[in-house]
Image (cartoon, helix red, strand yellow):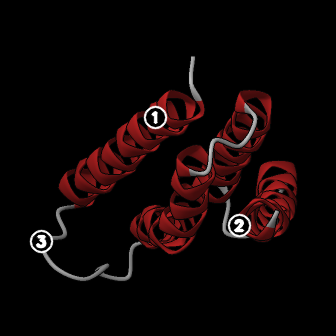
Amino acid sequence: MTSMQAATLYAGLFCLLMLILKANVGRVRTKHKVGFGDGGSQPLQRSLRVQGNAVEDVPVVLFGLLGLGALAAPVLLIHGLGASFLVGRILHAVGLGGSSGSSFGRSVGTLITALVMLATVIACIWYAVA
């Protein structure tokens, strides 16, 4: 597998994650009969926030992974960052989706997300100037 193939694999996996989060919002909207906004529904507010957090974070890291792929960074680096980020986003989604308070999934998912973002920043800069 080339670096670009690895990065593209994560592009596909994150597209799938975004579709799942979008479908979950639709499912919760239908269940709570809310056509627009959140209708004051806590479960809908949580599902919207889970999707919103992913919309904020996924494109940034995915852009970095694709940049690393274009620069032919090591495949293992791309897999390490991509897989860790995917696990972090799933943990965050499960944690926040289940409770608006703090939870293991939300806390660990947020921490993994931040660490992967930082590692992606460092790797992008390193491989761009090396």
As helix, strand or loop, the secondary structure at mark 2 comes to helix
Outermost front residue: 130
Per the model, the C-alpha gap separating discs 1 and 3 is: 28 Å
Residues at marks 2 and 3, CA–CA distance in whole angstroms: 46 Å
Q: Which residue is mark 3?
A: 35
How far apart marks 1 and 2 lie (CA) works out to 25 Å
- Which amino acid type is shown beneath numbered disc 2? Ala
Q: Which residue is mark 1?
A: 13
- Which of pointers 1 and 3 indicates the residue nearer the eye? 1
Relative horizontal placement of residue 129, taking residue 71 as reference (left or right):
right
Residue 60 placement: quadrant: bottom right
Q: Does residue 106 appear left or right of residue 115 in this picture?
A: left
| Number of the label disc, if any, that sits on residue 115 | none
Amino acid type indicated by mark 3:
Gly
Please, what is the three-letter code of the amino acid marked with disc 1? Leu
Label located before the other in sequence (2 or 3): 3
Is residue 123 placed above or below 17 in the rendered structure?
below
Residue tagged 2? 128
Whichever of labels 1 and 3 marks the residue nearer the N terminus, that label is: 1
Whole-percent x and y of residue 74?
A: 76, 35
For label 1, the SS is helix
Q: Residues within 10 Å of mark 3 (few under 14, many from 20)?
A: few
* Depth order, front residue of 15/93: 15
- Kindly identify the residue that appears in the image at 30 percent across and 53 percent down: 22
Q: Position of residue 82 (x, y in %)?
A: 66, 41
Frontmost of labels 1 and 2 is 2
The percent coordinates of residue 53 (x first, y second) are 55, 70
| Quarter of the image that includes the C terminus | bottom right
Taking the spot 61% from the left edge, 51% from the top edge, the residue there is 71
Helix, strand or loop at label 3? It is: loop
Q: Which residue is nearer to you in this view: 60 or 28?
A: 60
| Rendered location of residue 81, percent (x, y) | 75, 44
